[in-house]
Image: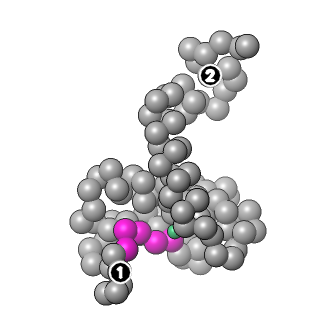
Amino acid sequence: MQIQIGPLTYTVLEVEELANGTSELYGDINYGRCRIRIAAESDAQIKLVTLWHEILHGILTGAGQTGEHNEAHIDALAHGIIQTLCDNPELREPAWPPSGGQEA
Ligand SMILES: [Zn+2]
């Protein structure tokens, strides 16, 4: 799978044994290689949250925010975006007003 983040195309790979030995690792992003890795053994729901988590890191880095990102904020946004898109599928379209929506 490939994900477009700004002008960059990231390759998304599911890999075994992503954990680094000291803590469980669900995924990571390598900006230089334009690569996102997702732990193959994770539940499908966790894989989706992890993908969004890494996409958000990619968005921030692409915007010049190259320092440490607040992991709690990244997780909150990943969960929130997924739930909002699930609850409001019309928001997946880049149009205003969203289909089915009404202008106020
Ligand atoms: Zn992170």
Instruction: Tell me which segment is drawn in magenta.
Output: 25-29
User: Residue 88: which numbered mark, if any?
Assistant: none
Q: Nearer the viewer, residue 54 or 73?
A: 73
**Rendered view: 20 above or below 8:** below
Taking the magenta stretch, the answer to whether it contains residue 79 is no
Residue drawn at point x = 50 percent, y = 36 percent? 85
- Distance of label 2 from label 1 (alpha carbons): 42 Å
**Rendered view: 44 above or below 27:** above
Which residue is label 1 attached to? 23
**Quadrant holding the N terminus:** bottom left
Label 1 is placed on what type of residue?
A: Ser
Residue drawn at point x = 46 percent, y = 72 percent? 28
Please identify the quarter of the rendering in which residue 62 is found: bottom right
Q: Nearer the viewer, residue 31 or 17?
A: 17
Residue drawn at point x = 47 percent, y = 67 percent? 36
Q: Nearer the viewer, residue 104 or 99?
A: 104
Label 2 is placed on what type of residue?
A: Pro
Furthest toward the front, the residue is 72
Taking the magenta stretch, the answer to whether it contains residue 26 is yes
Residue 96 image position (x, y, % from top left): 70, 23
Q: First in sequence: mark 2 or mark 1?
A: 1
- Secondary structure category for the residue under label 1: loop
Residue 35 image position (x, y, % from top left): 49, 70
**Would you call the spot at circle 2 few (<14 residues within 10 Å), some (14-19), or many (20 or more)?**
some
Please identify the quarter of the rendering in which residue 61 is found: bottom right
User: Residue 98: which numbered mark, if any?
Assistant: 2
